[in-house]
Amino acid sequence: MKHTLTLLTALLLAPLAALQAADAATPKPNILVIYADDLGYGDVQCYNPERGRIPTPHIDRLAAQGMRFTDGHSSSGVCSPSRYTLLTGRYHWRTRLQGGIVGVFDSPLIAPERMTIGTLAKQHGYRTAAIGKWHLGLDWPITPDQHKLLQKAPQKDKDDKAPIITEMHQAAWRDIFSKPIAGGPTTRGFDQYFGTDVPNWPHYKTWEGSFLCFIENDRTIGIPYEVLRAAKSKNDLASPAYIFRGQPLIECRLPTLGDRACAYIKDAALRPEPFLLYLPLPAPHTPLAVNQEWQGKSGLNPYADFVMETDAIVGRVLDALEKSGVADNTLVVFTSDNGCAHYIGKPDLEKMGHYPSGPLRGAKADAWEGGHRVPFIVRWPGRVKAGSVCDQLVQQSDLIATFAEVLGTKLPDNAGEDSVSLMPLLKGGDQPVRENAVSASAGGTPGIRSGSWKYIPAPGSHGSKGCDQSHPVQLYNLADDLGETRNLAAAMPEKVTEMTALLEKLITEGRSTPGAAQKNDVEVRRYPATPVKTAAKKKAP
């Protein structure tokens, strides 16, 4: 009898054991996050088929092979804050960055102990790399005197086109750029780093220009010794760059990053560990350093050409996955840090029939939807249905919780405080995974969502001109007013009170997800208030 029971038990448990063995044999997916810079919601053809005139075949193909989110958001209308939130799953306004961006030579925004998507992946046996634009601060080895020198605008030459670089400047460069740089990506969860800190800023904050300074791990490649004269610098469309001996000029930054990403994928595919690659592209952000192959291809303007070149780089990276044989086991996320900038000729593009923000109001820097509702695509063959579209509200903060679920783990209370797993949606569900989300303007003014309702505690959007100043706050129902044309604040004071209370709750609890309350790094600024003047008004990254 005992032998019979043992045999019966073994037979009953056999299917479970087989399932467990199969699950254990299933390799962990590689993860690739491609982060465009200033790519508008309407710049991708599949998001704007009727009023978009820029061909984006590779991004469109990615969407056709995966899931396209129509209500996906960055946490800000500008660069640094959105990058912080994507990497950490925590709203940037819980940090010192209450408005604007991380400045030249600023210290790291991500605290050393803070978990990132890289940290999470490494804890689960992944090899990790970041290739591209960082712009989250570094502990540069710079003295106060050097900082003061490099902040001061130098004299211009007789043609008033380029700064005159003195021996003092060159001595400072030799000192700073010959030392290791602490606090960078390799200290924030990434085994390897190659890229540029802020490719459209020199380390002269007051000098209009572009600084091509590749950084590998914790050192710059080369030391600047003079300045390249630029033919044009108006609106940062083409910019001068520091010259590094033996280094490519600014036009080569995008192809170089593409080369590095493809090489990394080829190498990583041969290794036993899965990989996570964070690929923050510096395009199509200005300077519009369009390579000759793409100049004039769009028939619109240099920005549109640059969007096409950016799309081609995405295609190269996706092809590298295919050629390396790992595409079927790679979870790919494609999104943008904020909307398209107005200063790249947006009005002219619209006259030609291309609307970079699609049906949305506003653009980069705004709390209106055009500032932060962005392309958001996920492809995971065999897991995410090809050609699917999801209209549920999602946030870039959600990536770290999503990856945690993919890896079969939960985040600790002090990580990903504003992150919700997207797995129910990726599996085909159509119920909301989050009821609210916050996305701020460049100056810090929040736009808070609750379902289809949106509340902006300010009369405009980062002080935009031409807005209705008769009401101190704004309330919209995006379900029937996606263009934010009808301010319902005066007609619905109870809803305004409700949204105000929700925003306060999210601030005071230090998180927007279930879990133990957490502390914000600083006292969070409250609104309505007058947005502070920030560097973001000067074509911020």
Image (cartoon, rainbow, N blue to C red):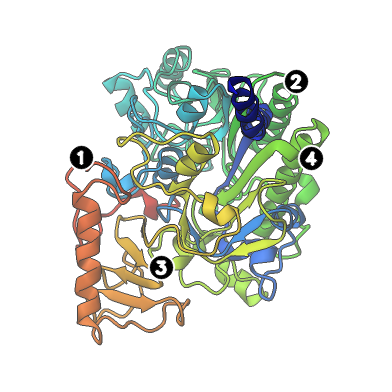
Q: CA distance from mark 4 to mark 2?
A: 16 Å
Q: Nearer the viewer, residue 79 or 517?
A: 517
Q: CA distance from mark 1 to mark 4?
A: 43 Å
Q: Quadrant of the N terminus?
A: top right
Which residue is under mark 3?
368
Which is closer to the viewer, label 1 or label 3? 1
Marked residue nearer the N-terminal end (1 or 2):
2
Which is closer to the viewer, label 1 or label 4? 1
Which residue is under mark 2?
270
Q: Nearer the viewer, residue 362 or 522?
A: 522
Marked residue nearer the N-terminal end (4 or 2):
2
Q: CA distance from mark 4 to mark 3?
A: 35 Å
- Tag shown at residue 519: 1
Marked residue nearer the N-terminal end (2 or 3):
2
Which is closer to the viewer, label 4 or label 2? 2
Q: Are marks 1 and 2 in contact (CB under 8 Å)?
A: no
Give the side of residue 292 with respect to residue 205, left or right: right
In the displayed structure, 351 sits above or below 208; it is below
Q: Are marks 4 and 3 in contact (CB under 8 Å)?
A: no
